[in-house]
Image (tube, rainbow, N blue to C red):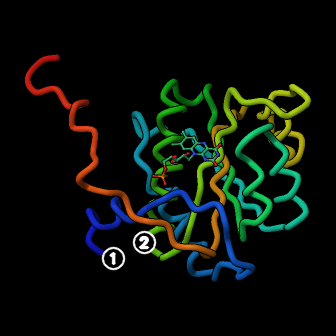
Amino acid sequence: MENFHDLLIKRRSIRKFTEENLSPDDVTTILQAALLSPAGKSKNPWQFVVVEDKEVLERLSYAKEHGAALVKGAALAIVVLAEPMVSDTWVEDASIASTLIQLQCEDLGLGSCWVHIRNRFTEAGQDAQEAVRTILDIPYTMEVLSIIAIGHKSDERKPHDIDKLQWEKVHIGKW
Ligand SMILES: Cc1cc2nc3c(=O)[nH]c(=O)nc-3n(C[C@H](O)[C@H](O)[C@H](O)COP(=O)(O)O)c2cc1C
């Protein structure tokens, strides 16, 4: 594990991947990170669908009009779901899990990108969640928050610039 602060600076959204598959050990480590996510009242309303099949990845890449095409080139995608009946913090819980998946990927030297699904639509105007539900046979009790596309980075991106942080968004004591 590298220094956590350096990891945060280095992590960028990666949208281009090599053809190389992920190792089973890496996939296990990434899924452990997902399952280690904290959740409100420890209700753990999330579930994860792991997709490696190229044809299914391609179908998922059309699940919304903009910003999903990159899923097609990923080695693997984790579709992050949650069940609102289990917890009213499901959006937060599934978002934390999505983030931890991405940070674990970076720690393993892998690239990842969050592809947002909730409140998004396909090119034909269909709800993106419905599109993903149909492709993956997801029950109606589950909401689809995101698809985290993962793979070996085909290009390195510049790390964040610590001198360009938006400090004006930090308010000390009161607004
Ligand atoms: C909630 C959320 C939704 C996002 N949705 C998409 C998406 O649908 N497609 C995409 O290519 N990137 C998506 N991203 C990635 C952002 O565009 C990216 O995190 C942002 O531009 C900052 O860049 P960085 O991740 O390299 O720091 C999403 C990120 C977040 C946190």
Q: Which residue is mark 1?
A: 1
Query: For residue 39, what is the image quadrant?
Result: top left
Q: Mark on residue 107?
A: 2
Image position, residue 48 (x, y; %)? 65, 52
The alpha-carbon separation of the residues under discs 2 and 1 comes to 6 Å
Q: Is mark 2 within 8 Å of ligand 1?
A: no
Most extreme residue toward the left is: 173
Q: Given the image, on which type of amino acid does mark 2 rest?
A: Asp
Relative to 161, does residue 119 appear above or below in the rendering? above
Closer to the camera, 30 or 167? 167
Image position, residue 74 (x, y; %)? 72, 66
Q: Considering the image in quadrants, where does the C terminus appear?
A: top left
Q: Given the image, on which type of amino acid does mark 1 rest?
A: Met
Image position, residue 25 (x, y; %)? 57, 81
Most extreme residue toward the top is: 175
Q: Secondary structure at mark 1?
A: loop
Task: Determine whether, in the image, residue 100 is placed left or right of residue 30.
Answer: left
Q: Are marks 2 and 1 in contact (CB under 8 Å)?
A: yes
Q: Considering the image in quadrants, where does the N terminus appear?
A: bottom left
Task: Determine whether, in the image, residue 1 is placed left or right of residue 19.
Answer: left
Query: For residue 155, what is the image quadrant?
Result: bottom right
Q: Residue at x 64, y 71 (%)?
A: 151
Relative to 59, does residue 27 appear above or below in the rendering? below
Q: Residue at x 82, y 50 (%)?
A: 60
Q: Residue at x 34, y 59 (%)?
A: 8
Relative to 50, does residue 117 appear above or below in the rendering? above
Task: Determine whether, in the image, residue 58 is placed left or right of residue 106.
Answer: right
